Image: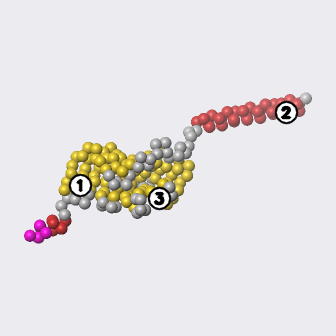
Amino acid sequence: MVKKYFLIVFALIAFSCVFLSCSEDQKSLKDMKEYTGPMTSLSNVVNLLSDSGIVKVRLKAPKQLELKNGNQEFPEGLNVEFFDKDGTVSSVLTANEGEFSKTSNVFTATGNVIVKNIKTNEQLNTEILYWNRKEKRVYTDKFVTIKTEDELLQGEGLTAAQDFSTYKIDKPTGSFILEDEVEEDTLSNE
């Protein structure tokens, strides 16, 4: 009888320890927050975007983070090259940081954003620029500066083709004619 009583008491103690332990574990699981950090981290990334087998865009980044929701982050900067129909680079976008939203299919470039049109030798400078891959356009509502061969354009907001072949400044604030350096040297020597 004592043996049975001892086994029953032991079983009750063991059951209560397991029950209390489980409830504490469940409580600690509820208190834990869901992990929202990167699922993977890639180094020296080169992503190619093509249409019908023809490369249209090449994105290079020293680091790419893949998040659980499908978004991507480029915390160490990015370099995006846009190709024209004959396969040559037509423009280049660089930025200190970038991110891609899977739901909106939009890249956001931030920090010292520069877009250079190789063919026209024009350069855009701004602090934030959005690139909509589906619509093949870039845009911002921030201050922009565009330097052409002979002019410096400034304003708030911009919409442009992704290859920077055409653009429109939403609220122009200034346009300055750049003098040719050769003419300046000639004038100063006279």
Q: Amino acid at mark 1?
A: Leu
Q: Identify whether 183 is placed above or below 5.
A: below
Q: Identify whether 123 is placed above or below 24.
A: below
Mark closer to the chain start, 3 or 1: 3
On screen, residue 30 versus residue 58, left or right, reads right
On screen, residue 93 versus residue 63, left or right, reads left
Comparing 144 with 81, the one in front is 81
Q: Is residue 114 in the magenta section?
A: no
Q: Residue at x 30, y 45 (%)?
A: 157
Query: What is the crowding at mark 3: few (fewer than 14 residues within 10 Å), some, or many (at least 20)?
Result: some
> How many angstroms separate mark 2 from mark 1 (CA)?
91 Å
On screen, residue 122 versus residue 40, left or right, reads left
Q: Residue at x 51, y 58 (%)?
A: 53
> Which residue is denoted by mark 1 in the rendering?
152
Q: Amino acid at mark 3?
A: Val
Residue 37 shows up from this direction = no
- CB under 8 Å between discs 2 and 3: no
> Which residue is denoted by mark 2 in the rendering?
7
Mark closer to the chain start, 2 or 3: 2
Q: Which mark is residue 55?
A: 3
Q: Over which residues does the magenta segment extend?
A: 186-190
Image coordinates of residue 44 in percent, x first then y, are: 49, 60
